[in-house]
């Protein structure tokens, strides 16, 4: 009987640790890995990119992201997909999150 009680306590502890880990993982998986906020600086290479302004073009909200020699316009949809607008007005999908903002195991 003592062994059964010990096993039950151990199982409860393991389940508690598992649930705590899943909750923590959900917070980190929900992190924004492409932050579009004015004032952000990205160092994808040794050359910084600056998020300089929020602008509206053709009734869509974009963020102006600049390198020292040129700028591009980025926007994020409800699923977290990232689009870039070129100088000629064409928009293309830059980053596609296959599952949106989901938590996949």
Image: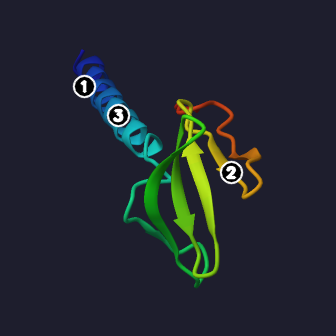
User: Disc 2 on helix, strand or loop?
Assistant: strand
Q: Sequence order check: which comes first, mark 2 or mark 3?
A: 3
Q: Position of residue 87 (x, y in %)?
A: 72, 58
User: According to the image, label 3 marks what residue?
Assistant: 23
**Relative to 73, is 91 on the left or the right?**
right
Q: What separation in Å lies between label 2 and label 1 (alpha carbons)?
A: 57 Å
Q: Residue at x 48, y 50 (%)?
A: 55
Q: What separation in Å lies between label 2 and label 3 (alpha carbons)?
A: 36 Å
Name the foreground residue: 38 vs 4. 38
The colour scheme applied to this rendered structure is: rainbow
**Relative to 78, is 54 on the left or the right?**
left
Q: Is residue 81 above or below residue 5?
A: below
Name the foreground residue: 62 vs 18. 62
Q: Sequence order check: which comes first, mark 2 or mark 1?
A: 1
**Relative to 2, is 91 on the left or the right?**
right
Q: What separation in Å lies between label 3 and label 1 (alpha carbons)?
A: 21 Å
Q: Position of residue 25 (x, y in %)?
A: 41, 41
Disc 2: CA contacts within 10 A as few (<14), some (14-19) or many (>=20): some
Q: Residue at x 39, y 59 (%)?
A: 38
Q: For the C terminus, give its image quadrant.
A: top right
Q: Sequence order check: which comes first, mark 3 or mark 1?
A: 1
Residue furthest top as drawn: 1
User: According to the image, label 1 marks what residue?
Assistant: 9
Name the foreground residue: 5 vs 70. 70
- As drawn, the label of residue 85 is 2
């Amino acid at each position: 009987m003592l062994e059964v009680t010990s096993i039950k306590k151990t199982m409860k502890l393991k389940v508690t640790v598992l649930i705590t880990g899943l909750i923590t993982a959900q917070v980190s998986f929900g992190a924004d890995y492409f932050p579009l906020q004015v004032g952000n600086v990205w160092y994808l290479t040794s050359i910084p990119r600056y998020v300089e302004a929020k602008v509206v073009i053709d009734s869509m909200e974009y963020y102006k992201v600049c390198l020292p020699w040129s700028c591009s316009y980025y926007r994020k949809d409800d699923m977290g997909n990232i689009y870039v607008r070129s100088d000629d007005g064409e928009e293309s999908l830059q980053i596609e999150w296959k599952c949106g903002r989901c938590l996949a195991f």
